[in-house]
Amino acid sequence: MWSSWSFSQGLKPKIQSINGKPHFCFSMKQSKLIATYLEQKVANDSLIEMLHQKNATLENLVKAKNEIILKSSAKAYNLRAITISQETQIEVLRLELKKEKRKLRKQRFFTKTGTIIAVVLGILIVT
């Protein structure tokens, strides 16, 4: 920011002594120029403050967005891990089901074979 000293360097004030203290007095035109510069400075300061506040708000929004993205990524990773685990469990259950089916086929085969052998032996013994 610039100070009032920088724009008043070209102005030639009249020095008057009031109560023994020197005071600088400007003409009406010079006073209007100084007032205009000061109003612009106040307006610029308020704009700068407003932009700082908007910038802080936007930074907070970006931070919140990044946190949401991070949490969403973690959630997606966890869901993929759950899906892979479920697929693995399904595959294990399929293999167990296959083994059980083979075991049942063997049991049926041996049961039928045993029944047939018993019937044949029974017929042979009777005859």
Image (cartoon, grey):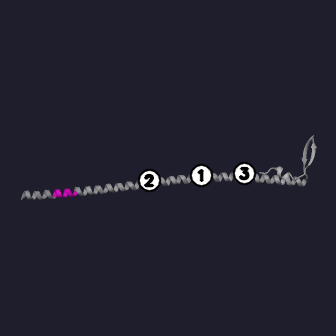
Whether 100 is among the magenta residues is no
**Looking at the rendered structure, which numbered label has been put on residue 46?**
none
Give me the residue at 77% from left, 53% from top.
43
Task: Answer with mark 1 or mark 3, whichever residue precedes in sequence.
Answer: 3
Amino acid at pointer 1: Ala
Secondary element under disc 1, as helix, strand or loop, is helix
According to the picture, the residue beneath numbered tag 1 turns out to be 64
Task: Answer with mark 2 or mark 1, whichever residue precedes in sequence.
Answer: 1
| Front residue of this view, candidates 9 and 28 | 9
- x then y, percent, for residue 77: 48, 54
The span from disc 1 to disc 3 (Cα, nearest Å) is 23 Å
According to the picture, the residue beneath numbered tag 2 turns out to be 82
Position of residue 99 relative to residue 20, above or below, is below
Whether 114 is among the magenta residues is yes
Characterize the local packing of mark 1: few (<14), some (14-19) or many (20 or more) Cα atoms within 10 angstroms. few
Residue 65: image quadrant is bottom right
- x then y, percent, for residue 126: 7, 57
Secondary element under disc 3, as helix, strand or loop, is helix
- Magenta range is 108-115
The span from disc 2 to disc 3 (Cα, nearest Å) is 49 Å
Task: Please state, as top left, top right, bottom left or bottom right, where the C terminus lies in the image.
Answer: bottom left
According to the picture, the residue beneath numbered tag 3 turns out to be 49
- x then y, percent, for residue 41: 79, 52
Please, what is the dominant secondary structure of the magenta stretch?
helix
Characterize the local packing of mark 3: few (<14), some (14-19) or many (20 or more) Cα atoms within 10 angstroms. few
Amino acid at pointer 3: Glu
Characterize the local packing of mark 2: few (<14), some (14-19) or many (20 or more) Cα atoms within 10 angstroms. few
